[in-house]
Amino acid sequence: MAENTRILSVGHDHHLLALRTIVLERAGFEVIEAFCVSDALRLAQSDAVDLVVMCHSVPRAEQKLLLAGIRNRRRLMPVLSVIAHDFVMLADSAGPSVAPKLLVDALRQAATNYSSYRPNLAA
C-alpha cells in the first residue's frame, strides 16, 4: 500500500519537514512537500496526493483554512495534523505518540481504509 500512496507533507519548519520526509520515504511513501498554504491547497485539491500531513509548525488558523479548502474539493481525503507529542486525524479523533513507526503505521492505516480508521488510543 505505501508504495502507491502519495503524501503531501505541509509545514513551515524546513528541518521538521525534511526529517518527516526521510521517515516517510524510508517507509515507502512518495512525499511531496509544501511550505505555504497556497501551494498545499493547490496540491491537496488536485489528484496529485492521496493523504495530507500538516506539521505543528503551521499555525492553527492556516490549518483550518487548508482543511476547509481540502474538504471543499476532496471531502474524504485523509488529513492528519501532527502536534507536539501526538497527531490528530482532523475531524476524527486523537491518536498515539508520533514516534516514527507509529506515525507510519497510522498513515498506512488511514490511507488503506480512511472511512473506518480509528487510532488506537491505548498505544
Image (cartoon, helix red, strand yellow):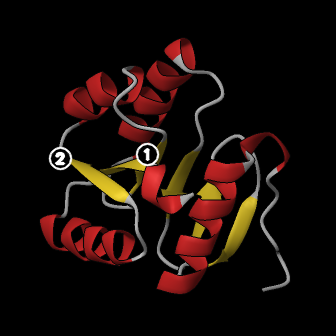
| Label 2 to label 1: alpha-carbon separation | 15 Å
Please name the residue shown 16% across and 73% down the image: 15
The correct choice, above or below, for 77 with respect to 74 in the image is below
Amino acid found under the numbered disc labelled 1: Arg
The residue singled out by tag 2 in the image is 35
Instruction: State whether residue 93 appears in this view.
Output: yes
Amino acid found under the numbered disc labelled 2: Phe
The correct choice, above or below, for 9 with respect to 36 in the image is below
Please name the residue shown 45% across and 20% down the image: 69
**The residue tagged with tag 2: helix, strand or loop?**
loop
Mark 2 or mark 1, earlier in chain: 2
Left/right of residue 58 with respect to residue 33 in the rendered view: right
Q: Which mark is residue 60?
A: 1
Task: Tell me which corner region of the image, top left, top right, bottom left or bottom right, holds residue 34.
Answer: top left
The correct choice, above or below, for 70 with respect to 19 in the image is above
Task: Tell me which corner region of the image, top left, top right, bottom left or bottom right, holds residue 61.
Answer: top left
Instruction: Indicate the quadrant containing the N terminus: top left, top right, bottom left or bottom right.
Output: bottom right
**The residue tagged with tag 1: helix, strand or loop?**
helix
Please name the residue shown 25% across and 77% down the image: 19
